[in-house]
Image (cartoon, coloured by chain):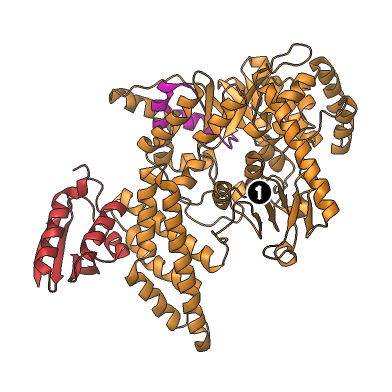
Chain colours: A orange, B red
Amino acid sequence: MIAESEVTNEVDRLHAAHQATIADLRHAIDLATSESTTVVSILESYLMIASDPIITQAIIKRIESGASAEAAVVDEFDVHKTFLYSARDQLLRERVQDFEHVVERMLAALRNRTLSHELRSDSIVVAGTITPHDMLFFKRMSTIGFITEVGGVTSHSCILAREYGIPAVIGIRNATDLIGDGDEIIVDGFTGLVVVRPNDATLQSYHKRMAEQSRERSELASLAALPSVTRDGQTVVLRANIDTAIDADAAVAVGCDGVGLVRTETMLVAFGRYPNADEQYQWYRSILERCGTSSVTFRAFDVGSDKFREGIPHHEENPALGLRGIRFLLYRPDIFEQQIEAILRASVHGDVKFMLPMISSIEELDAARRIMDHTIASLHSRGVAINASIPIGVMIETPAAALLARSFAERVQFLSIGTNDLAQYTLATDRTNELVADIFDAMHPAVVRLIAQTVDAANEVGIPVSVCGELAGHAAATELLLGLGLRELSVAPSLALELKHRIRMAESVACADAVATVLTCTSTTEVYAVLQSLQAGDHGRMIT
Amino acid sequence: MIESTVTVRNRAGLHTRPAAMVVKVASQFASDVYLVRDGFNINAKSIIGVMTLAAEQGCELGVIVDGSDESEAHAALVELFHSGFGEQL
């Protein structure tokens, strides 16, 4: 309960948050107008829900009778959600998501978490945390740097920043107190250094380094047309990890040989809900059309309550170990079937592969296949044109899957190793928790051995295996991965040329020798030491 | 005051988009507009109200319009329901 004297303050907060939410949505509609009428019509319904005058009055009444603004918003919408939950029609029940989305936006505005949208195009954003959703917005605003108080190097926002080539420093406690509005700051993503109000000498030295980097980058650009082969003639297939059709253009521009990972859940952020099969089909098709005859691997929605909460029945104490990836898809076969249908339909427009996330048992693969077979049969009976024999693969990102790699390899057409989650689950280390950030390292010998086991299993059975995790783009890991026998890597388009450069500098035989030693290492430090002794010159330097 | 009954004809029912259309049309008029389902009465100018009717295909709703432009408002709403909101019937 709030005191009577606070009522006016709470109502003012509500009004401010309300206006911010509405302005936010209007802005989003403006941005989306050129892209998709579907997205616009969804945003417009959010706008109408947010601007509903009758509900706003009801929320104010709740504040006047002692509720905080947050509680009033949540409670009022809960009443209406209850009505919808009891709807007989599934489609109408799902509209609860629309309410939830608006409530979330309102709460974010009340917490003042949504940052000012009047950002200048050369701004650096300093925040407590940044959601991937915010990140998409900042990308469009040409934000030039990020500093956050919470998070680890492999948090989703950080991965996005890296993919977009935007410098970010994370885990700076009190950053929002230490840095003021309008302060000049240097964000050094290489060293994780933030310089507030730098002096002239520092500024100059950074300007010089930026100029050097852009020169190096243009040198790299000439690599785009060159093949990705090691010095001793081993060809490495280099693919891109992408989120949108625009990223596919970037992948083609840097000479990637197709797309090794499409994170289809990005579409959910854009739509704010689960798009139907028709909408998904258009989205998949637009990516395929940009990739020509090169293969494109779509990963089924990898959602969990930390990534995209809608459709998950309740709060989870530990989302990383919860209903996510394939578990969620099997829990919601309706959503899974729509996605399979859309991918099968799109598969006539290109070379499509389909990949299942977060697999930890053979039963999950079997269950997914049954749903797939069922969908194929239903599409056949409707006479829809599809390619029913697209290759199916699984992500190896749990220790369970890595240990069973051979069994999976015998049942699927390809394996793809997700090194972040594999490290997180093997090391029992939350990759977004800055307190244990120093423990999290995919170069840990336990993780390296699981990767080695997976690669061996795939090679014995004779199916392709790739790494599409962060490790593939890690400057120090190229020799390790080549030495382990990997010949397919997938990275963000912004990292592809740098990786190609390292591949072209590497000697696969020497890498294999070094890896034999690496596999006897018992500590992460030893692994790094072995790899460092292998790297000649400065080609291990990171360019972000 | 005008009272009548309409039927939800489109297959997907009164989901977000059609609900938004109802609100848009109702809000163009000065009259009070209410929709009634099973004795449950909501203001048709509130999208949340219209959505919470959870009116599926085939559902019958009462329409109550009261005000200076009630006949125009009533006609516009009846036509909207009859057209199935331009969706698949």
Query: Closer to the camera, B89 or A112?
Result: A112
The chain that hosts pointer 1 is A
Q: Is residue A434 magenta?
A: no
Which residue lies at the image location 24% right of the left edge and 56% below the top edge? Answer: B55
Query: Closer to the camera, A233 or A141?
Result: A141
What is the span of residues highlighted in magenta in the rendered image?
A342-369
Q: Is residue A71 visible?
A: no
Query: Closer to the camera, A144 or A330?
Result: A144
Mark 1 is on which residue type?
Answer: Ile
Query: Label 1, on which residue?
Result: A144
Find residue A464 and report its image quarter. Answer: top right
Which residue lies at the image location 26% right of the left edge and 66% below the top edge? Answer: B45
Left or right of A104, for residue A195: right
Q: Is residue B68 visible?
A: yes
Disc 1 on helix, strand or loop? Answer: loop
Q: Is residue A348 magenta?
A: yes
- Mark 1 packing: few (<14 Cα in 10 Å), some, or many (20+)? some
Which residue lies at the image location 59% right of the left edge and 21% below the top edge? Answer: A257
Residue A231 in the image: above or below residue A52: above
Which residue lies at the image location 83% right of the left edge and 23% below the top edge? Answer: A515
Residue A223 in the image: above or below residue A80: above
Where residue A32 appears, x then y in whole percent?
43, 47
Find residue B42 and report its image quarter. Answer: bottom left
Question: For the image shown, how many numbered marks are present on the structure?
Answer: 1
Query: Closer to the camera, A544 or A70?
Result: A544
Left or right of A37, for residue A13: right
Where residue A173 appears, x then y in whole percent?
75, 61
The quarter of the rendered structure image containing the C terminus of chain A is top right
Where residue A58 appears, x then y in whole percent?
36, 75
